[in-house]
Amino acid sequence: MSKRERGLACACVLGLALAVGFVAGQIWTRSQATPLLGQTATVRHPANGLAWLARVDTGATLSSIHCPIDRIDGLVEPPIANVGREVTLWLAGDDGTTLPVTTSIVERSLVRTESAVEHRYKVRLEISCGGATAFTLVTLNDRSHMRHKFLLGRDFLEGRFAVDVSQ
């Protein structure tokens, strides 16, 4: 058998092994230790128990929660002066319960959406989802016109979950 024929035979055997492994689910599968999320997931604020059915969005850099300006106590003018300031957010869970959450405004930034460019405050918020609990940056946004009052972005998902939108 020539050198070329041996190389071709090895390539064929390797290709067949890969195909059999792929079909058997042995290759290119997620780790069983990595939790899997679908299009939505339940997110909780561990300190007070508020809960939301969140939209999982791997295209969003940061998470976002429904909290219009009129639900934030402690804001001053001009808006940039609120960065670093402690405020109270009045957050409403999906069950209609509204509770206060005290946090500090980390940043005020420009956010581009499909339809507009707007300024939003960012706060650090502790959330739990799928067995993971962490402090994460969350933008405050008026999501009253949206179905899901919480959007779970890559900042919280990365390194913690695999996402399968068909679930």
Image (cartoon, rainbow, N blue to C red):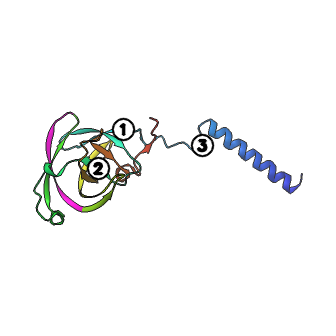
- Position of the C terminus, as image quadrant, is top left
Q: Residues within 10 Å of mark 2 (few under 14, many from 20)?
A: many
Tell me which amino acid carries mark 3. Answer: Ile
Q: Residue furthest right?
A: 1
Residue visible at 36% across and 38% down? 40
Q: What secondary structure prevails in the magenta region?
A: strand
The residue to which callout 2 is attached is 64
Would you call the spot at circle 1 few (<14 residues within 10 Å), some (14-19), or many (20 or more)?
some
- Of tags 1 and 3, the one toward the viewer is 1
The amino acid type found where label 1 is placed reads Thr
Marks 2 and 1: in contact by CB < 8 Å? no
Between the C-alphas of marks 1 and 2, the distance is 14 Å
Viewer-side label of 2, 3: 2
Q: Which numbered circle lies on residue 27?
A: 3
Looking at the picture, how far across and down is residue 2, in whole percent? 89, 54
Which residue is located at x 41 percent, y 45 percent? Answer: 161
Spot the residue most to the top: 95
Magenta-colored span = 95-107
